[in-house]
Image (tube, helix red, strand yellow):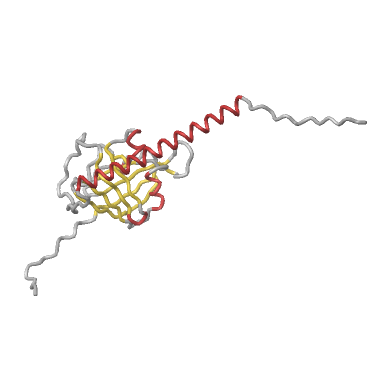
Amino acid sequence: MKLRVSFARARPPWTAIQCLFLILAIACLGLYGYTYIERVVYQAYESRLFDNAVGGVASVVPAARESAPAPSAFPVSVIGRLSIPRLEFSAMVREGLAPRTLRVAIGHIPSTPLPEQAGNAGLAGHRDTFFRALKDLRVRDEILFETPRGNFKYRVESLSVVEPSDVKVLAPSRENVLTMVTCYPFWHIGSAPKRFVVRAKQAPTEPPPNLAGLELR
């Protein structure tokens, strides 16, 4: 009588490197989830506060006729809300370019004017969060910038890719324009080598209809 002895193939134990990679993957997922939730909650909360502050409606303010120096600091961190109707995009704008600011909102470049001031208003954002939408922009697209002082409408004039050292895109302008800057290429892993720049011109305000002489029946 023959005895058959079977030996189960033992699975190799997890190595220290495999365990390290697993811990790193879990940590990365947890960090991404936290920053995503933080961003969503912040945007929803500030958007609601903004709507309550302006009553949900802000009148269109005419473009400034004279240039005014941009203040070095603002009384409140939230400046307004940027939206692109065609792309169904909307995000709150905060003052400054600190990492904490750009993590939860679009940042207004402090050295540039606000929409209600004449000149070149600059905004910056991460290409993998809020400004990912810029890759689908087209010339002539409409951009809306709501602030406590009113709603400002812009029309995209140009889309360009420049070197990070090219600061001419933020140079002062006699016209009321909006310049949005983000890293490029959009799908690049790591520190992106270029900058994607959107230039939009503020649309003139349409005057109210002249009701003088209008006969009502």
Residue furthest bottom in the image = 217
Q: Position of residue 36 (x, y in %)?
A: 41, 39
Give the quarter of the image for residue 122: top left
Residue lying at the far left of the rendered structure: 213
Q: Nearer the viewer, residue 58 or 3?
A: 3
Image coordinates for residue 24, horizontal then vertical, percent: 52, 30
Query: Which quadrant of the figure contains the C terminus?
Result: bottom left
**Point 56% across, 31% down: residue:** 22
Q: How many numbered marks have been drawn onto this rendered protein structure?
A: 0
Q: Is residue 27 left or right of residue 51?
A: right
Residue 168 at what x, y percent from top left?
Answer: 31, 42
Q: Nearer the viewer, residue 43 or 101?
A: 43
Relative to 47, is 12 above or below? above
Q: Give the quadrant of residue 112.
A: top left
Q: Residue at x 31, y 49 (%)?
A: 199
- Front residue of this view, candidates 85 and 23: 23
Farthest residue, direction front: 1
The answer to whether residue 83 is left or right of residue 62 is right
**Residue appearing at x 39%, y 49% in the figure:** 133
**Residue at the top extreme of this rendering:** 16
Above or below, 23 against 192 in this view is above
Identify the image quadrant of the N terminus: top right
Whether residue 92 is situated above or below residue 8 in the rendered picture: below
